[in-house]
Amino acid sequence: MKLKLNKNQAGKIARKIGFDVPPIGLFKIPQIGKIFVIRRFDYHASNRWKRMEDFGQVLGYSSENKYTGTYNKIAKGIENYSDAALVDIVEFWKRLLFAFFIGNGDMHLKNWALLEQDDLRGRLSPCYDLLNTRLPLPKEQFELALPMDARQNST
C-alpha cells in the first residue's frame, strides 16, 4: 500500500511564523480516508519518554471533561507550573490567536500541554492538533473550544 502525504497547511503556516511544530501531515489511506499524523516529540534521544501533561491533567479534569476549563485557567496553569512562565504565557496567547484566525474551534484542554525538557524542567509543549475545523464543520457553534473571559465567540 502506497501512502500519499498531503501537507497540513495550518502546521506549515505555524512553522513559518515561528511556532514550534513537529513534522505533521495528512495521509490518505485507501478504504479509510485521510488521517492526521504527527511525529512524537515526547521521546528523548537517550531512549526515554519525556514527561508530558496536558492541561486536562494539570487542571484536574478527566478526559471526558476536556471542554470544561477555560483559556484563562490554562494561562494560570502555565504561570504556576512552567519554568519559563512569562515566555510560555506569551507563546500560549499567540498560539490561541493563531488557532482563532485559522478557524480551529477545537483547541480544548488536551491540545495544550507542559513537556519535560532535557534539564527536567517543564515548558509549553510544541504545537499539535493544528487544523481548521470550520471547513469540515461549517455549523460549528463556537469559534473557540473553551471560554475566554466567559466568551467563546467574537460577536
Image (cartoon, helix red, strand yellow):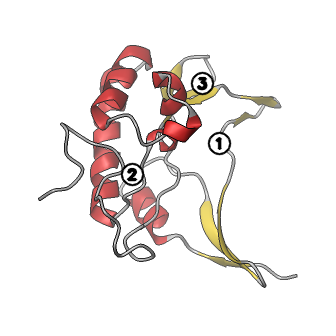
Labelled disc at residue 116: 3
Could you tell me how far apart the alpha carbons at marks 1 and 3 are, in whole angstroms? 11 Å
Residue located beneath label 2 in the image: 18
Q: Name the one closer to the observer, 42 or 140.
A: 140
Name the residue: 46% across, 64% down.
Answer: 131
Q: How crowded is the residue under tag 3: few (<14 C-alpha within 10 Å), some, or many (20+)?
A: many
Q: Earlier in the sequence, mark 1 or mark 2?
A: 2
State whether residue 73 is above or below residue 107: above
Q: Is residue 30 left or right of residue 81?
A: right
Q: Which image quarter is the N terminus in?
A: bottom right
Q: Which mark is residue 11?
A: none
- The amino acid beneath tag 2 is Gly
Local packing at callout 2 (Cα closer than 10 Å; few below 14, some 14-19, many 20+) is: few
Q: Which residue is mark 1?
A: 41
User: Looking at the picture, how far across and down is residue 6, in whole percent?
Assistant: 61, 78
Quarter-wise, where is residue 32 in the image?
bottom right
Calculate the distance from the C-alpha at mark 1 to the C-alpha at mark 2: 17 Å
Q: Residue at x 59, y 25 (%)?
A: 117
Q: Is residue 113 above or below residue 25?
A: above
- Contact (CB < 8 A) between labels 1 and 2? no
Kind of element beneath mark 3: strand
x 50%, y 31%: residue: 56
Question: Where, by quadrant of the figure, is residue 5 drawn?
Answer: bottom right
Q: Amino acid at mark 3?
A: Glu
The answer for how far apart the CA atoms under marks 3 and 2 are is 21 Å
In the displayed structure, would residue 118 be above or below residue 144? above
Name the quarter where the C terminus is drawn.
bottom left
User: What x and y, as percent, mark residue 29?
Assistant: 75, 79
Q: Give the residue drawn at x 78%, y 84%.
A: 31
User: What is the three-letter code of the residue carrying label 1?
Assistant: Phe
Disc 1 secondary structure class: loop
